[in-house]
Amino acid sequence: NSDMGVLGFSHKYFYNENTKQTINLAVSGTQNKIISDSLFNKRENKIMTYSSQFTEVKYSLIYNINKKVNVKNTINSGITADIYQFNYLDSFLLGGKKYISATNFKGNSSLMQAYFKWQHKFSDKLALNSGVHYQQFLYNNSVAVEPRLGLKWSLSTKQSISIGSGMHSQLQPMSVYFYQTQNNDGSFSRTNKNLDFSKSNHFVLAYDYAFATDWRIKTETYYQQLYSIPVETRSSAFSLLNAGADFVLPNVDSLKNKGTGTNYGAEFTLEKFFSKNYYLLFTASVFDSKYKASDGVERNTAFNGNYTFNALAGTEFNLDKEKRKVLTLNTKINYAGGKRYIPIKLAESQIQHQTVYDYDHAFEKKYSDYSRVDVKLGFKLNRKKITQEWAFDMQNILNRKNLFQQTYNPAKNDIQTEYQLGFFPMMLYRILF
């Protein structure tokens, strides 16, 4: 199970009509608990194979100052300080004989960030946005300096073309830094401690057209060059780029920032803003996502479904002249390319009585495509100081059986198929002050 909470405070101060500052203070926390058990050799009692309890609290200070120097120039700068408190502990059964801990850490660290942005308007139609972003992770003193540049050309009041490029860096999932490697003498070492940021170079070209009142279309093409991606020291198909595809982070130690990857694609958006009691939104994305791990072989990433389409629509019916009683109807449709997977070697899994994957063909094939239709019917009661809402949310109303994963089942000595959530009706009541 998972729990989270967020609390924040924001303060804005205007020095004058051209200069303002913003200070944000926030604290957020997450806690994840996982317990996995299994039956071995037809025993009646379950045996725990893995357990973990990861707790993370983050305290954030964000300061920003924005100044309009003159008609053509505006500068924006700020700093962010994130202080993390960690408490990570897990335990898994090794070889069916003893329990060891891959992650055992309690402590704190910080991520410091600073940025500077400058916007220069050459004219009412042409504007340049430039800047630099700095990050430093104090746990291992990793540093990233990221220059960024963008240009926006307004063809008219309704059309614009934008082009941009920049460097972007990302921390690894926090628990990855604290994975342990057991030494020959039985002691442990944190071999992932000095991992650098994952990094990428981004290039984007976009076109925006507001072709009618409350309507607009937007198209965007992009290319991302990824590098400094954590991969294993030994030759393998593992890359941290694929982490999270199964909603669980792998416990892999002795990683190095030698992996690469590429993402490129195009996106299209058609949007009708809410007016005349209805709205519409359609998005389409076609893309390709590849990576190289320590074995040097280029493969699809686990997320390379190649396409995804989404449609949302909603309308409201006023049941009285004062618009106090409102009936709402919303629909959402999702369609996406199937999930990439690593095939299972069934014969070898049956011999070893555990899952044996065919990494030579990792992520070559996809499961069947994903589709889902949600419908929500609601009623709003508007008052001067309060709004009440009742809704009946029917998720996956067509009860589509979307394949989640296939695993080897030692008890049945065969491959088992698991599906995602089917038809799920849910009642909602909400009060807005």
Image (cartoon, rainbow, N blue to C red):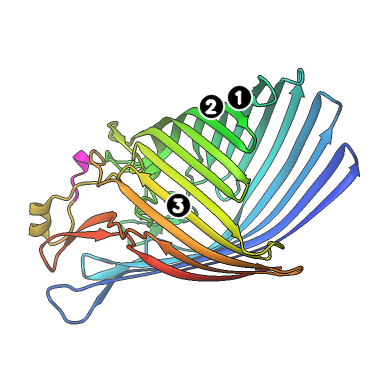
Which quadrant of the figure contains the C terminus?
Answer: bottom right
Q: Which numbered marker is on residue 332?
A: 3
Q: How packed is label 3: few (under 14 Cα within 10 Å), some, or many (20 or more)?
A: some
Query: Disc 2 or 1, which lies upstream in sequence?
Result: 1
Disc 3 vs disc 2: which is toward the camera? 3
Task: Name the image quarter holding residue 378.
Answer: bottom right
The spot of residue 104 in percent (x, y) is 44, 64
- Marks 2/1 in contact by CB < 8 Å: the verdict is yes
Residue 24 appears anywhere in the view: yes
- According to the image, label 2 marks what residue? 204
Q: Which residue is drawn at 34% across and 62% down?
A: 421
Task: Name the image quarter holding residue 147.
Answer: top right
Task: Say which of 386 and 267 sits in front.
Answer: 386
- According to the image, label 1 marks what residue? 162
Q: How far apart are marks 3 and 2 (CA)?
A: 28 Å
The spot of residue 43 in percent (x, y) is 15, 79
Residue 360 magenta: yes
Q: Which residue is drawn at 77% across and 18% down?
A: 123
Is residue 4 rendered to the left or right of residue 335? right
Query: Disc 3 or 2, which lies upstream in sequence?
Result: 2
Considering every residue shown, the one lying at the far bottom of the view is 44
Q: How far apart are marks 3 and 1 (CA)?
A: 30 Å
- Going by the numbered disc 3, the residue's amino acid type is Lys
Q: Which residue is drawn at 45% across and 69% down?
A: 426
Is residue 328 rendered to the left or right of residue 132? left
Magenta span of residues: 357-361
Q: How packed is label 1: few (under 14 Cα within 10 Å), some, or many (20 or more)?
A: some
- Marks 3/2 in contact by CB < 8 Å: the verdict is no
